[in-house]
Amino acid sequence: MDDELKSQLRKECIKNLQLVATSQSCTSELLKNIISEIDINFYRNLHTTYDYKEIVESTLINPNCSIKLLEDYVDIYPFFVIDSPKCPVYLYDRILNITDYQDHTIRDVARKKDCPDDAYEKMLSEVSYSYLGIINKDALFWISKSPNCSFELLISLYRRLSNMTKSPESFNYILGAIASNPNMTEEWLIKMAKSNIIEVREGVAINPSVTPEILEELSDDLSYHVNIAVASSSVCTPDILRKLSTYENTKVRARVAINKNTPEDVLYELSKDSNPNVRTNVVRNINCPIDIYRELINDNSDLVTSAIASKNNCPLSILKRLMYSDSEVTRRSVALNKNLTPDLIDILTNDTEFVKAGLAMNPNCQSKQLIKICKNNNIRVINNSLRNRNCPKELVDNLLSIDDTKIKESILLSPRCPIDTLTDYYNYFITKANFIEHYDSDISIEDLKKLSDDKDVQIRKLILEHPNCPIDIIIKYTNDIDEKLREEADKLLKKKNSYFKFKSIAGDNKPNKNIPPVREINDVEKPNEKDNIDLLKEIKQEEENKEEEIKKLILEHLERTRELTYKLETLDAEEKLKFRQLLRVRIPDNELLVKVGEHFEIRREYLPYLELIDFSFISSDNLKVSHIDWSKTNMSIDPQKVFIKDLSYCKVSDENLTFKDLSDCVLIGADLSEDKNSYGYENAIIDDETKLPKNRKIIFEK
């Protein structure tokens, strides 16, 4: 087996074993078996260490992982152990002493809410310079935010960072985090409120210990970032909020609209605001009067009507009207409302799959209704139904009988997955992983038979080529759906027949009891393809010609983009921008994109030249956009329609995001610092590597 094929098959095994390790149904015993099997059979081979590390991570961060297992692996994988929700406090000190990964572990320990006070002094003494000689800013930021970090340590850190001479502005966000720490005294908050650093004043404004007098002073700040922070403060007075409600910046008014201290008369005024984000936040306000719902029920913005529909105190009379809205987003919000009665839920079970996916999350949706909405096998509806507390065993059994990879994955990841199903799945892919890693060794006939019906034709081909392949598998493969495999099986069976005949002639013509009975090659049933063989050849030739054409076009366009790249090197920044806009190359989508499974990806050949390609006519629907820098391109991205809503580790500009709703999107490691008007961050999946817009960062993390 060559290395490329081995790597490809290994990745598929990793993906499936990771599903088991991630499953909410996975028991601590099964998790222990997974990590032991990986550790014993694969970690000894250095070339597989990196590949299988992902499974170890999924195992250790699973909420069902035992503390004993965390203790066993804390010295090898401290950064996985610290991420576990079950990581005990007594392991923190041990983790901090592991110098190899200190940059990561200090940051991760600092983020823990139960981190003991005495750990922060030790962390600050270690964090000054990492093993690369570079200040670990991530760790400093989380230390600065922690409510367990003492006032004395915070002031010491603030003074040190304020006196930095090398790139002092790069520490501003850390100074802002210190200013937002609840352990800061009123005396220091007054001093910091006069700082010339915007982030510090912003941090003071959102500090839960800030006084109304300081907020009054900051409400006149020239920076709208500070005004937003003031309007977001939980101790902001009604008078300050009334003053900020007339501020020209819509983001400030939007924060006033959602603040629980905003007076009712101000809410009525803001409900007439021209900006839909402001009106939406009025509705989201915990103290919003129901009369405002009635006034805004016919609002022309989906944001507003869906916000009304999602309110727990929304009357049934309003919900009944909104469930017939033309907006699918609004109807989905109605479907999610916990006040829905069974008869209204029945009506929504006939709505679109998008609405049904919301209905599947409603705790009032009953077993029969969940079975009904899953009939179309929509993967989102199934995912949500399996997580519903009313999900019946009948639905799980029905779904298990469907031969669909995505549905099976959904079942495996859900808390409803039967442990027997999970164990069988684990055993199968452990066998497959062993087969891949030890193919050149002695594989048992039992394992070969277990894998002989694998969906991957490459696995079946490897089984056929293995010296231990039994005769009954060879015979079975002469009827395989893959033409090439059938031919190979036919040839191999002929050799086997000749061999057994030779043995019979050379011996005493007595049947050998140790040799299983063999069917003659002529007895093997074969698909009738004689009539279609010419047509198949013709189709194959057409496909090969088409592929050759695409390859030629790729080479031509690559040559063109290389010429443009050379020209760009001679231009200054402003001219470069104009040059890119004028001379972007238009490439046909069938050449630029390649279909991978059920989604599309940019061909690898073009990835280095994205900024020189014209994306104005390329759709982002079902396109994989993760791990790509789009910020210098003219690509229009709809986060709700890209492949599995995944924007992880990609970089986008404000112009790239044509649709601004980031709800339910995966933004892990994404760079959204240039974004201006998007919303839905609160409902997105982010981590500490996600770069949010500056004006959102501290507010969101609060």
Image (cartoon, rainbow, N blue to C red):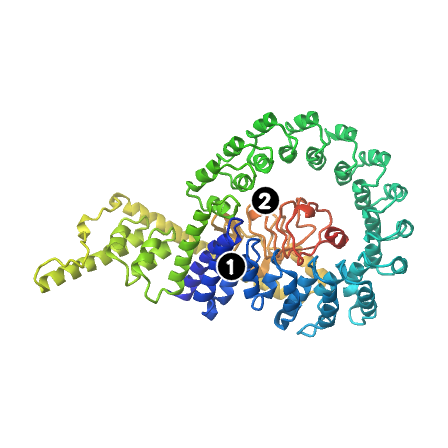
Amino acid on which disc 1 is placed:
Ile
From where the camera sits, is residue 346 visible?
yes
The one of 193 and 604 positioned closer to us in this rendering: 193
Residue 442 shown left or right of residue 271 in the figure: left
Which residue is rendered at x = 62% and y = 33% of the image?
Answer: 335
Q: Which mark is residue 538?
A: none
Q: Nearer the viewer, mark 2 or mark 1?
A: 1
The one of 365 and 89 positioned closer to us in this rendering: 89
Residue position for label 2: 641
Q: Earlier in the sequence, mark 2 or mark 1?
A: 1
Which residue is rendered at x = 73% and y = 47% of the image?
Answer: 677
Residue position for label 1: 55
Which residue is rendered at x = 62% and y = 69% of the image?
Answer: 101
Q: Are marks 2 and 1 in contact (CB under 8 Å)?
A: no
Residue 141 to residue 416: above or below: below
Residue 523 to residue 152: above or below: above
